[in-house]
Image: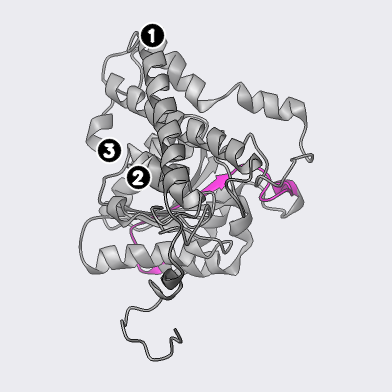
Amino acid sequence: MADAKAAKKTKVKGAPAFSKETYLRWYEMMQLMRKFEEKAGQLYGQQKIKGFCHLYIGQEACAAGAITALTKDDKWITAYRDHAHPLGLGTSPNAVMAELFAKATGCSKGKGGSMHIFDKEVNFVGGHGIVGGQVPLGAGLAFAEKYNNTGNLCICYMGDGAVRQGALHEAFNMAMLWKLPVIFVVENNGYAMGTSVQRTSNVTELYKLGLSYDMPSEPVNAMRCEDVHEAVARAAERARAGEGPTFLEFRTYRYKGHSMSDPAKYRTKEELENYRNQDPIESVRFTILENQFATEQELEEIDNKIKAQVQESVEFAENSPYPEPSELYTDIYVEKDYPYVMV
């Protein structure tokens, strides 16, 4: 995984903001997220993936730009639009796809599905289904890092609908009071589920909610990896210095509906096309080609490698077994012989 050191800015005047290695890392990472999600959407239509399924298409820079700004020891937590973050952090596409198929080889043993991806190995502490429920959990993860004096932080993602939950305000208050090393991120794609931000509150510039707690807060153009990285790096520096939390409003856009069952009729084709013209992958691709970091052929080779990875993940998921019925009783209680489990 790329870390903060790998993304040091070049100092040559007129040069791109980051190194060749970082741009290529962003390109490959976001292409994996995009191709994986596109395939997941197809498989959902074929009813091979069931239940809820929330795709990240269009929002890839929100995760990719942050990953290069943080370290592998920092903790990550998010809501239920949660496939892309672990993929970027290094979770095997096989394990994520198998989880979407509810197979035993999935990263949550087939028991979490699309909305509950976890991977302790890459410090991804899960996708969470209760709107805003992960916000106090993110503060708690940060409290543990501070208590144990690790020097690490937690980055806690949420959707724009979550900022209306009371739990967010309780978590903000405690995080500032105790100066917890946490970066709160709202991925503002404009619509929560299907209702625009303008129709849900008088406060439409969501970053301003943090200001009432004297929390450093700012809006970020999250269609660009560069802007995301820089904002997260600033917040991380404050957190590691003991200065407490930051609230970032990532202004982004999802090309698909809220979930696979959402036809997204509440927005115009013109609006969608406007954001497609700001596509984060195409932006990084342009910078790579413009600066001769790679050729068209080399980028095509990356694309082909990713397509093969995604196809392999589908085959792996299809060929994997479902969990045994006995798995209903595992991973529930820490105590092995908990007396109230009836088998």
Q: Residue at x 49, y 44 (%)?
A: 218
In the image, which residues are magenta? 175-198
Q: Residue at x 44, y 84 (%)?
A: 343
| Colour approach in the figure | one colour
Q: Residue at x 49, y 35 (%)?
A: 36
Which picture quadrant has residue 295?
top left
Q: Is residue 240 above or below residue 70?
A: below
24 or 158: nearer the viewer = 24
Q: Is residue 231 visible?
A: no
Q: Is residue 78 above or below residue 339?
A: above
Discs 3, 1 touching: Cβ within 8 Å: no
Task: Kindly identify the amino acid type of the residue bearing the numbered disc 1.
Answer: Gln
Residue 1 got which mark?
Answer: 3
Q: Is residue 176 magenta?
A: yes
Task: State the SS at label 2.
Answer: loop
Instruction: Residue 240 in the image: state x and y as whole percent.
Output: 26, 53
